[in-house]
Image (spheres, rainbow, N blue to C red):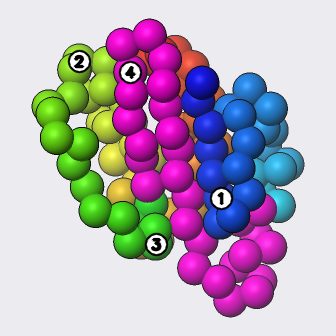
Amino acid sequence: MSKIKIGESERDLSEVNESWITHQVREREQNGESVCVQVKLKDDGVEMILSTPQCGCGGGGGRLPNEKEKSIFELWNTRHLNQHKWEVGNLIAFLKQLHRLI
């Protein structure tokens, strides 16, 4: 089961839409909060957690990523979600493209 967590709000990826994601991010930005996003993926051949830098989480899961996971990491980085100045549109684009990889 794959999930997305924005701040303290968490949902299954199958239950989120662009409006919910945008609302969660914008609400936190307007409140002056740092917006932490975590995408937890657990699917056939994929088990990983991706976090924006604002989460302050350490990295590394103790094993090397497989080919599917490498592709997902590359997409995350291509969408600049590994940088402090990421955009909600890039998060939405990442999630749309993610379905083709898993």
Q: Percent from the top left, x then y, of residue 72?
A: 37, 30
What's the distance in space between the residues labelled 1 and 3, CA to CA? 11 Å
Query: In percent of the image, x 70 and y 79: which residue is there?
Result: 29
Q: Crowding near pointer 3: few (<14 within 10 Å), some, many (20+)?
A: some
Q: Percent from the top left, x then y, of residue 6?
A: 65, 59
Query: From where the camera sits, is residue 90 visible?
Result: no
Instruction: Give the mark nearest the N terminus, 3 or 4.
Output: 4
Q: Give the magenta part as a residue range.
A: 24-51
Q: Crowding near pointer 4: few (<14 within 10 Å), some, many (20+)?
A: some
State the residue position of label 2.
67
Residue 23, placed above or below residue 68: below
State the residue position of label 1.
6
State the residue position of label 3.
54
Residue mark closest to the camera, 4 vs 2 = 4
Is residue 74 covered in magenta? no
Q: In which quarter of the image is residue 49?
A: top left
Give the residue type that dot 1 points to.
Answer: Ile
Query: In percent of the image, x 83 and y 50: which residue is there?
Result: 20
